[in-house]
Amino acid sequence: MLKSIFIIFLFQLIGESAQKYFELTVPGPVIGLILLLISFILLKNNKNLFVNKVKNEISSTAIHISNYLSLLFVPIGVGVVMHLSYLEKNYIEVLGVIFFSTILTIGFTALVMEAINNRFKKNDRKK
């Protein structure tokens, strides 16, 4: 488990470094997560037992870490309380952004699910 946590943090460090070096607006941990996903995709059909064992350990560790994901919302709640005066001044804009981003997210999710559903239906017809 320690080895897989190290690998996850290594990819996060690489993402942070890339974000700082290229001055990107995307957060470093997101870049690291994308790089980890790309490495998983590239190593998907790898026959090496060591690589497959490490991939399984990383997946297992990620599942264990996600059980504590709710703890990450504590700093966000503290930030909201600290900036309550800003929210009071701009509550209409904030609520508008929340409303429209929620609608866009629901719509995008529906389109993606429809595409996935159609792809599965095409694969079932071929069999």
Image (tube, rainbow, N blue to C red):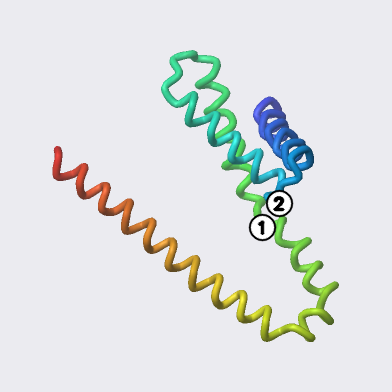
Task: Report the quarter where the C terminus lies.
Answer: top left
Q: How far across and how far down the image is residue 73, in percent?
A: 71, 61
**Label 1 neighbourhood size at 10 Å, few (<14), some (14-19), many (20+)?**
few
Per the image, label 2 sits on a secondary structure element best described as: loop
Residue 45 shown left or right of residue 125 in the figure: right
Residue shown at 72% from the left, 31% from the top = 10
Residue 127 shown left or right of residue 62 in the figure: left
Residue in front for this viewpoint, 73 or 100: 100
Per the image, label 1 sits on a secondary structure element best described as: helix
Residue shown at 26% from the left, 47% from the top = 120
Residue in front for this viewpoint, 127 or 107: 107
Q: Quadrant of residue 12?
A: top right
Give the numbered dot on residue 70: 1
Q: Earlier in the sequence, mark 1 or mark 2?
A: 2
Residue 23 shown left or right of residue 47 in the figure: right
**Label 2 neighbourhood size at 10 Å, few (<14), some (14-19), many (20+)?**
few
Q: How far across and how far down the image is residue 30, in percent?
A: 65, 46
**Closer to the observer: label 1 or label 2?**
2
Task: Report the quarter where the N terminus lies.
Answer: top right
Residue 23 shown left or right of residue 69 in the figure: right
Amino acid type assigned to the residue bearing label 2 in the image = Thr
Number of disc labels: 2
Q: Quadrant of residue 36?
A: top right
Amino acid type assigned to the residue bearing label 1 in the image = Ser
Q: How far across and how far down the image is residue 89, in percent?
A: 79, 86
* Cα gap from disc 1 to disc 2, whole angstroms: 25 Å
Q: How far across and how far down the image is residue 45, in percent?
A: 42, 22
What residue is shown with label 2?
Answer: 25
The relative height of residue 110 versus residue 21 in the rendered view (above or below) is below
Q: Are marks 1 and 2 in contact (CB under 8 Å)?
A: no
